[in-house]
Amino acid sequence: MHSLSKVVKRSGAVVDFKAERITNAIYRAAVAVGGRDRETAIQLTKQVIALLEAATPAGHTPTVEEIQDIVEKVLIENGHAKVAKAYILYRAESTRQREQQAARQTRSEGKIPWAKIWYSLDWAVAHGLNTVEGLNERIEKGEFPEIVQESEAAYNIEIKHVVEDISQRREEVKLVIVSGPSSSGKTTTTKKIEERLTEMGMHLITLNVDNYFFDLEIHPKDEFGDYDFETPQALEIDLIDEHIQRLLAGERVAIPFYNFKTGKREPSRTTMQIGPDDVILIDSLHGLYPPMTASVPDDQKFKLYLEPLLQMKDEQGNYVRWTDLRLIRRMLRDAAHRAYDPRRTLTHWHYVRASEMRHIIPNNSLADYIVNTGLPYELPIYATRLRDDFAQWTEEYRDDPLREDAYTRAKRVHELLIQVTPVEDDSPIPADSILREFIGGSCYEPG
């Protein structure tokens, strides 16, 4: 028996052993099956460490896989079969994702129809914006304002199609859901759809599902101790579904209030009731997560999924990654509206990404319509604002075994942004653009 101080990661890197990571992993698995007892997770962690110390020969540094095997054993032996199953499934899913990572880079993410991808690529080719080289050539000709206008027109055509589809089903649709991964443009898209449907005589009532977050103290955390808001288990999903069902039945419902300053859900501050012709509108990361609206028949829902489906190749022939666009968007938004250092967004993104790959992106096949929120003119704006930061992070995290993901993303984004001709003047970007949601100046911002 010896005291544990180091652990070998799957990459072979040796890092400090921290018991909190085991506790967080056990607690996340418990949350996935409805448990919220962190103290039990702490006690189980102590058992894991005791067994691990007893089983580890002197001079041997345990691997992540060895620790996970013992976690499974402890969970099962202590009668936590459901938690053990959730832990095992999570572990298997993580392995599958690593094995399929290379394949994923060569195909449409999730189940987005190839016809949708082809349409986006065809538009990009027609406008000379399917390569960074083409984008730069147009910028150097002074055509940045025209690129903005063309991109915004394409996006607004998508909104027009969505509104037309909803209007055609106005007699049956009782719930409109706007969903998509982090920073895909849900806020602006939701506002635009609401405006246009209102103009057509439809009355939409917004249900803010953020008020259904569990108290922060019982949120699951990642390996770095950051709270995980990206998992559906951060919300009381059953209560959301119950309230939607009651609202559609004509009942008056007491809506909870989540205080983000205190991290606690407070008693109801308001009640809500809808009329027989009203439509509930939801804007949520997890809007397509089936249990959230399980009580509502599918023919009464219109489900929308958003993703920046930018079709543009860099100088090496690699397509710009949609997740990188959303990472940059979230950095800018977090810095502007939440006083977060963009570095924090970068180092947390691995967890955002893992959760959306499990809980958000697989559900995009359930959508009635997919909106492309990618804007080719985003990159020149980002090159001005964050290129130097990504260069700094690339150097800072180059040899940090705990920040391998941050380094990989920073290096990739930096290599992209140094290819793009930067644009400082953002005045051609309209106030109702999706991009304004992230860089500021949106007409939809409160106040």
Image: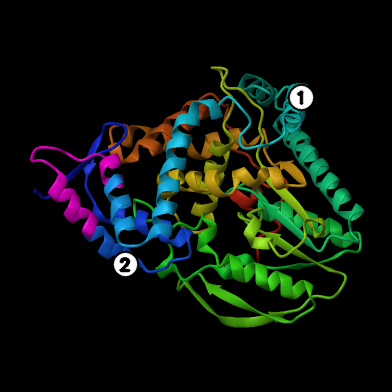
Task: Tell me residue 379's x, y (percent).
Answer: 59, 34
Give the extent of the magenta segment.
Answer: 47-68
Above or below, 14 against 73 in this view is above
The quadrant where residue 287 appears:
bottom right
As measured in the structure, the alpha-carbon distance from the residue carrying label 2 to the one carrying label 1 is 55 Å
| Res. 28 visible in picture | no
The quadrant where residue 300 appears:
bottom right
| Res. 375 visible in picture | yes
Secondary structure type for disc 1: helix
Q: Is residue 417 magenta?
A: no
Tag 1: residue type?
Asp
Q: Which mark is residue 159?
A: none
Q: Residue furthest top?
A: 316
Tag 2: residue type?
Thr
**How many neighbours does mark 1 have within 10 angstroms: few (below 14), some (14-19), or many (20 or more)?**
some
Q: Is residue 57 magenta?
A: yes
Magenta portion: prevailing SS class = helix
> What residue is pinned by disc 1?
122
Left or right: 18 as drawn, with respect to 59: right
351 or 120: nearer the viewer: 351
From the viewer's perspective, is the residue at label 2 or at label 1 nearer? Answer: 2
Left or right: 87 as drawn, with respect to 102: left
Task: Tell me residue 101's x, y (percent).
Answer: 49, 30
- Name the residue at 35% across, 36% down: 404
Task: Tell me residue 223's x, y (percent).
Answer: 34, 51
Task: Tell me residue 332's x, y (percent).
Answer: 53, 48
The quadrant where residue 428 appears:
top right
> What residue is pinned by disc 2?
40
Secondary structure type for disc 2: helix
- Name the residue at 70% across, 31% down: 144
Left or right: 222 as drawn, with respect to 379: left
Give the quadrant of the C terminus. Answer: bottom right
